[in-house]
Amino acid sequence: MEIGYENLYKIARKSTNLTQDIASEFLDISRDSLSAYERGITVAPDKVVCKMIEVYGTSWLAYEHLRTSTEVGRRYLPKIHYSDIAKSVLKFQKEVGDLDRVNSDMISIACDGVIDHHESDRWTSITKEIEEVAGAALSLIFTKEKTSLDGSLEKVTY
């Protein structure tokens, strides 16, 4: 888990105002197991995380669990900057606009089906823009459950 942040599993549980005792009953695990997950002593198994997502109503936990608990996630999944709906929409639109500006380069490079040596740096810039769009899109998808990962808890209801 990331230093300086409250544990993901704890944030998700607290967003529902459940105690560890009650949450562990709903999750069908021991309180000690839940405590170990929330203190970062052990990583919650996928089956338990799936149950947490269902019980807590926090679909963002699926992404963050994969991003922080697996080597693949740590290396390749972009960090999502969670925000309110207005900021999320604006960020997404900004990133889509940035991607639109590199669209002709993307098409030009892709036309021959090969990224030539002289095109490599530009392609890296393009893929960075694509990753930023993906992160902004995920942030927008998870906006409804604005339980921020900085430890503050705010549940948005529609």
Image (cartoon, rainbow, N blue to C red):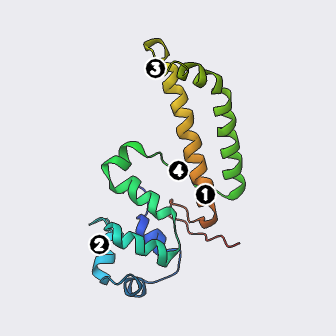
Residue underneath mark 2: 36
Distance from disc 3 to disc 4, alpha carbons, whole Å, reads 31 Å
Number of the front mark, 2 or 4: 4
Number of the front mark, 4 or 1: 1
Q: Earlier in the sequence, mark 2 or mark 1?
A: 2
Residue at the location (52% across, 39% down)?
Answer: 131
Label 2 SS: helix
Q: Quadrant of residue 19?
A: bottom left
Residue underneath mark 3: 114
Which quadrant: the N terminus?
bottom left
User: What is the residue that sits farthest to the front in this orientation?
Assistant: 112
Local crowd size for mark 3, using a 10 Å CA cut-off: few (<14), some (14–19), many (≥20): few
Tag 1: amino acid: Ile
Tag 3: amino acid: Val
Number of the front mark, 1 or 3: 3
Residue underneath mark 1: 141
Q: Quadrant of residue 157?
A: bottom right
Tag 4: amino acid: Ile
Number of the front mark, 2 or 3: 3
Residue underneath mark 4: 80
Residue at the location (66% across, 45% down)?
Answer: 92
**Residue 2 appears in the rendering:** no
Taking 37 as reference, is 74 above or below it? above
